[in-house]
Amino acid sequence: QVQLVESGGGLVQPGGSLRLSCAASGFTLDDYNIGWFRQAPGKEREGVSCIRSRDDITVYTDSVKGRFTISKDNAKNTVYLQMNNLKPEDTAVYFCAARLGRLCALARSTNYGYWGQGTQVTVSS
């Protein structure tokens, strides 16, 4: 069955970096778009970035452009989110998710049918 497992979260100081990993099983990255979402306490789940299945086109929400980079390794069936220059407002639980179709459709989390369990990212001094 489709399974997504995130790792790489942790505590980091402002300005620091983390790399999140999303290991996929039960399907190949050629068939599914992979998105990263985050949810801070008391806030709605927010789409952060996405990489499309067939053409590797990437999408970012404005608040992370220039700081976050999404990539994938098809041989490892894994998607990464490199996060640089982290800010306290990046603190959240980060989830990866998968969806079929041509588009990333990050605007709504309900566009994604498969989810990982999440990994906590805390940015604090």
Image (cartoon, rainbow, N blue to C red):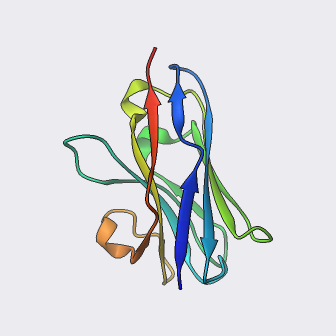
Is 44 above or below relative to 32? above
**Residue at 61% across, 71% down:** 24
Q: How many marks?
A: 0
Give how far across and how far down residue 106 sits, in percent.
Answer: 39, 63
Is 117 above or below relative to 8? below
**Residue at 57% across, 27% down:** 85
| Residue found at the far left of this picture | 42
Q: Tell me which corner region of the image, top left, top right, bottom left or bottom right, holds residue 16.
A: top right
In-front residue for pair 40/26: 26
**Residue at 67% across, 57% down:** 71
In-front residue for pair 13/1: 1
| Residue found at the far top of this picture | 125
Q: Is residue 57 left or right of residue 36?
A: right
| Residue found at the far right of this picture | 75
Q: Tell me which corner region of the image, top left, top right, bottom left or bottom right, holds residue 8.
A: top right
In-front residue for pair 79/4: 4
Give how far across and how far down residue 119 sits, in percent.
Answer: 47, 48
Q: Is residue 44 left or right of residue 47?
A: left
Is 34 above or below relative to 14? below
Give how far across and how far down residue 6 sits, in percent.
Answer: 55, 56
**Residue at 55% across, 62% down:** 5
Give how far across and how far down residue 104 sits, in percent.
Answer: 47, 70
